[in-house]
Amino acid sequence: MPLRSARRLGAAITVAGLLCGCSSPEDRFSQHVERAGELAADGVRSNAVDPGSMRTEMRAEAYPDEDPGQVPTPAEVADIFVWLASDRSAEVSGQRFRAKEFDAEASYQS
């Protein structure tokens, strides 16, 4: 039995932001949707997250006049990734999320 078929549960999370190396986030999401269908056959749910702008050293160098307090840290947008990797999102697949719009409290209560 192939190793791929031996494990039938899992989660794949595609990061679909502007700096992902694609011509657009929509292109990255289209690729994700195709893979989601393929992975579902093996019991793997797959979702995409657009993390949006984040407060990083690289961003600070690129936008030196930007107020860093107006941009979330990676830790502040991590909840969507944690939720998608958890069993609480077991029925969610083939979706696209914007990290800034994710309501962690509402998601963990369901």
Image (cartoon, rainbow, N blue to C red):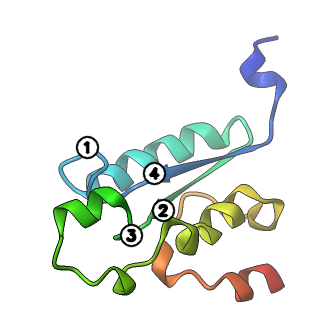
Name the amino acid, label 1: Gly
Helix, strand or loop at disc 4? helix
Lateral position of residue 21 relative to residue 102, left or right: left
Q: Which residue shows up at 22% across the image and 56% down it?
A: 24
One can see residue 110 in this view: no
Q: Nearer the viewer, mark 4 or mark 1?
A: 1
Q: Is residue 13 visible?
A: yes
Quadrant where the C terminus sits is bottom right
Disc 4 and disc 1 in contact, CB within 8 angstroms = no
Residue position marked by numbered label 4 in the rendering = 33
Q: Name the residue under label 3.
A: 55
For the residue marked with disc 3, what is the amino acid?
Arg
Question: Horizontal and vertical percent for residue 13?
Answer: 56, 51
Name the spot of residue 61 as percent of width and height, x first: 21, 61
Which of the two labelled residues, at mark 2 and mark 1, occupies the earlier sequence position? Answer: 1
Q: In which quarter of the image is residue 29?
A: bottom left
Mark number, residue 21: 1
- Say which amino acid is labelled 4: Val
Q: How far apart are marks 3 and 1 (CA)?
A: 19 Å
Q: Residue 49's mark?
A: 2
Callouts 4 and 2 close, C-beta under 8 Å:
no
Q: Which of marks 4 and 2 is in front?
A: 2
Query: Of helix, strand and loop, which one carries label 2?
Result: strand
At 55% from the left edge and 58% from the top edge, which residue is drawn? 94
Q: Which of 5 and 11 is in front in this view?
A: 11
Marks 2, 3: nearer the viewer: 3
Number of residues whose C-alpha sits closer than 10 Å to that of mark 2, classed few (under 14), some (14–19) or many (20 or more): many
3D distance between C-alphas at marks 2 and 3: 17 Å
Real-space Cα separation, disc 4 to disc 2, in angstroms: 12 Å
Q: Residues within 10 Å of mark 3 (few under 14, many from 20)?
A: some
